[in-house]
Image (tube, grey):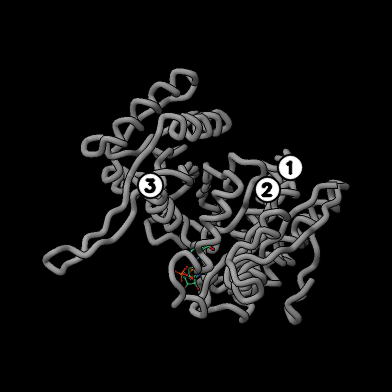
Amino acid sequence: MAKIALLPGDGIGPEIVAEAVKVLEAVAQVQDLSFTWETADMGGIAIDRHGTPLPEATLAVCRSAAGVLLGAVGGPKWDALPGDERPEAGLLGIRKGLGLYANLRPARIFGPLEAASTLKPEVVAGIDILVVRELTGGLYFGRPRFREVLPNGGMRAVDTLEYTTIEIERIARVAFKAARGRRGMVTSVDKANILESSRLWRETVTKVGEEFPDVELSHLFVDNCAMQLLRNPQQFDVILTTNMFGDILSDEVAMLTGSLGMLASASLGGEVGLYEPVHGSAPDIAGQGVANPLAAILSAAMLLAYSLDNPEGAALVERSVESVLAQGFRTRDIWQPEDRLVDTKTMGNLVVAAILGGGVYDRQNHSL
Ligand code: NAD
């Protein structure tokens, strides 16, 4: 019996995690498995209840689970707090605390959503990109990091960009291994024409690549990659990159698919995998029942694949999402006039019904 830790968080987090749980329960029913759940506080709700965004007890719950499903954290209520006391500090803390150095963000365009992208359908048709982002090094963690007042009264602020060969080797291996199960191509993205840390990145990735002769490795400068993603995204399979470049490029890749509400992610490398939607807590729509739960549901599918070694269950969830979209059901963020508008819970129920082999959707009551 696998235990799954739930960290619903803030804003729309609890609404979408509830739908992902329903979906995992449906998979368990079909596959004759059983899951146990333990919920813990993280983010703003943890600040309110425990005075810190990431209580030790929450980390302990995560460590005792087979996988962790996170909703989202943050919101205007906590925006005035200093950086390291804000809900988002919990995100950096949990990555460090669980040793999660590899962030995987798949961006696949579901056929029925090709028209929802801001790019032309023929440009985005069939894209299936996996961004592998280094998560615990680089500019976001480098030291020294400080501000000082200059003699002229102005300020100086310093961040440090550093990488070690060990950090680069381990994330590169994640990318090469992932490519083996896909189209066998890795594009490593850096700024080796300018940055010393990028030159080490490129040399090290090239060396690790020799261990994977069956995977085709190429290198791109980050500015060129940003441009190629809009010009011809179909050329990419796995994109391997640093913490900061990955932060930016993965949001660009996200927009190719049409909506943030569709994108899942996995953070791996440590004792337990953490799965969460790419989007934030969407305070503007929290509590209205209109959030798209599919990113959370697809994150739950990644949990099945990577933490529970259940690729069949993951594929079942993905196929079910695709079939619900093919029937024209959409939450507001991806809705167009010819579609059937549904709320958060109904979208979850529809995916559950597809998993269980087809429930009948009651249009009047928006239920199954
Ligand atoms: P956001 O992703 O929360 O929202 C951006 C826009 O997308 C909003 O208009 C929102 O309504 C919409 N949106 C996002 N997810 C959606 C969904 N599932 N369905 C429908 N629409 C959706 O980003 P933001 O507004 O920049 O940030 C809001 C808060 O979330 C901030 O406090 C931020 O720090 C936090 N945040 C948290 C995470 C995380 O928990 N991993 C990630 C990013 C931002």
Residue at the (11%, 66%) spot, across then down:
152
Residue in the foreground of this view, choosing between 85 and 351 = 85
| Residue located beneath label 2 in the image | 303
Q: Which mark is residue 142?
A: 3
Q: Secondary structure at mark 1?
A: loop
Whether the residues at callouts 1 and 2 have beta carbons within 8 Å, the answer is: yes
Above-or-below relation of 262 to 285:
above
Q: Dot 2: few (<14), some (14–19), or many (≥20) neighbours within 10 Å?
A: many
Name the one closer to the observer, 353 or 93: 93
Q: Amino acid at mark 3?
A: Gly
Mark 1 vs 2, N-terminal side:
2
Which residue does the image show at 74% across and 67% down from the upper left? 349
Q: CA distance from mark 2 to mark 3?
A: 30 Å
Q: Amino acid at mark 2?
A: Leu
Q: Hey, which residue is sitting farthest front in the picture?
A: 151
Say whether marks 2 and 3 touch (CB < 8 Å).
Answer: no
Which residue is nearer to you in this view: 87 or 173?
A: 87
Residue 71 picture location, percent across and down = 62, 63
